[in-house]
Amino acid sequence: MAFLDELGKVISDKSKEAANKVKDITGVIQLKSKLSSEKEKVNKAYISLGKAYYDRHEASLEDEYADEFKTIQAGIIKIAVLEDEIAELEGTRVCAECGAKVEKDALYCSKCGAPMEDKTAGAEEEDSKGPEVEFTVHGEADESIFAEEDSENEE
């Protein structure tokens, strides 16, 4: 009888563990969906801003395009927060040198070998500077004009 009780306990524990994994995966999927939505908003704001500037290149940026700038700034902040949440759920962090995803406790990046900075020191520095995002312009075939450093690491 003790064997069946022990087996039941093991099955119950494994079921709870699996349920937690599914919950984490679902959370990551939902966050990635929100992240994609925010990136799309930022892309649309960039396109709108660029077209408007092109059409009226002599206009004042601060007054005429304030809404687009606010949308872009808010989107960049939301993107940084969502990426941090995803990394936390996945148990990873991003290498500052190459943008690769690295295990949370790793001392060095597994892709480029760069030393991983202390998480608390990096968080203090990040707070003082704000989120750092790199923008690049893609070719004509790709309408998106927003790309992050680590776009090759997604999925």
Image (cartoon, rainbow, N blue to C red):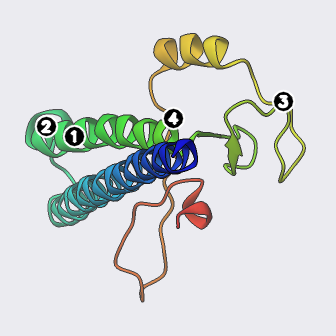
- Circle 4 sits on which residue? 132
- SS of the residue at dot 2? helix
Structural distance between the alpha carbons of marks 2 and 4: 21 Å
- Please provide percent x and percent y for residue 143: 34, 78
Asked whether the beta carbons under mark 2 and mark 1 sit within 8 Å of each other, the answer is yes
Instruction: Give the mark count.
Output: 4
- Circle 2 sits on which residue? 66
Q: Which mark is residue 69?
A: 1
Structural distance between the alpha carbons of marks 2 and 1: 5 Å
Dot 3: within a 10 Å radius of its alpha carbon, few (fewer than 14), some, or many (20 or more) residues?
A: some
- Circle 3 sits on which residue? 107
- SS of the residue at dot 4? loop
Work out which residue is located at the far front of the displayed protein and give it.
1
Residue nearer the viewer, 13 or 101: 13
Structural distance between the alpha carbons of marks 4 and 1: 16 Å
Q: What amino acid type should be assigned to the residue bearing mark 3? A: Leu
Q: Is residue 16 left or right of residue 139?
A: left
Q: What amino acid type should be assigned to the residue bearing mark 4? A: Glu
**In the rendered image, the vertical position of residue 20 relative to residue 55, given as above or below:** above
Work out which residue is located at the far right of the displayed protein and give it.
113
Q: Earlier in the sequence, mark 2 or mark 4?
A: 2
Q: What amino acid type should be assigned to the residue bearing mark 1? A: Phe
